[in-house]
Amino acid sequence: MKNIIITGGSGDIGGAVAKRFLDYGWHVHLLLRSFESPIIQSIMKLSFVSVYQSDPENEAITLSTIQAIKNDGVIPDFVFHSAGTFLWDDGYPKQARPFLEVRDILLRANVKTKASPVNAIESVYKDSLSKIEQAFIGSHAANFAPDAPERTGKYKEEAYVEAMSIVQNMVNILADSGKYKNIFLFEPGLINTKMAQQAFPEERLGFKIDWDTVATPEQYAEAIFPKEFFEARQ
């Protein structure tokens, strides 16, 4: 049986990807902050699901969690990185702090949720990296030019854009390293998740999104992991 580790397992995308891999007979190892999501509550009851409470912002906790998975005799065939903080600059609680300090907090939080699991995998499975495929959820924000209006408009997003640019660069470095079997970077676009609905209200965008027309996490999981993906890995 093949094994997948999913970070950000309590999120809508992580949960949908977990169900997709379970449908094809993989053993799913979920790293998550919270067990409260209805998706997680249903997945936890299924066979071939192992759940680990973890925090991708905490390097020590992430490392110990990955080590615990290895101690259970698991070498992952695939790692899906969907963990993220995804804090918008204007969404940070108003505090009496200089903006640059707040920006630094946001930048570090957004990057660390991606970098910590990568570093843990590299450390714990250093002798098995050539057998591992990894996939990352990126963001089109990484492609904004440094002086683009999207960075400096009403809803300031400088820290988020810079964080996504760093993540994109990190993925490129991993791909160029030749250490891993495969490295994928998926652009999610707009997906009908609770996080997206909260992040893109009408007052932010200037127009109302018809969420019924936006792809669900399950539809997205099927799109990036089609039947052919699993057939090639039987």
Image: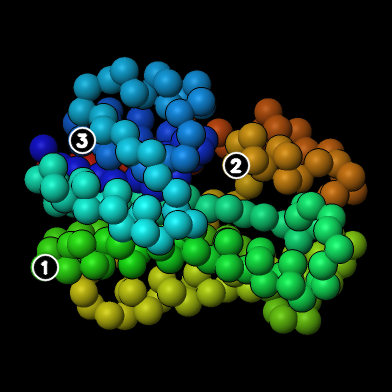
Q: Which quarter of the image is occupied by the N terminus?
A: top left
Residue 27 is labelled as 3
Distance from disc 2 to disc 3, alpha carbons, whole Å, reads 25 Å
Q: Position of residue 160 (x, y in %)?
A: 66, 65
* Vertical arrangement, residue 204 with respect to residue 215, above or below: below
Please, is residue 228 above or below residue 114 in the view? above
How far across and how far down the image is residue 82, in percent?
A: 45, 50
Instruction: Name the residue located 70 percent from the left edge and 79 percent from the top edge.
Output: 145
The residue drawn where x is 67% and y is 55% is 87
Location of residue 222 by image quarter:
top left
Q: Quadrant of the C terminus?
A: top left
Of badges 1 and 2, the one in the foreground is 1
State the CA–CA distance, disc 1 to disc 2: 36 Å
Horizontal arrangement in the rendering, residue 144 relative to residue 15 (left or right): right
For label 2, the SS is: loop
Label whose residue precedes the other's in the sequence (2 or 3): 3
> Callout 2, which amino acid?
Ile
Q: Which residue is mark 2?
A: 191
Residue 221 visible in image: no
Q: Are marks 1 and 2 in contact (CB under 8 Å)?
A: no
Residue shown at the point (11%, 68%) measured from the top left? 127
Where does residue 123 sit, x and y in percent of width and height? 24, 67
User: Neighbour class for label 1 at 10 Å: few (<14), some, many (≥20)?
Assistant: few
**Disc 1 target residue:** 127
Left or right: 98, with 105 as reference point: right
Judge depth for marks 2 and 3 and give the one in front: 3
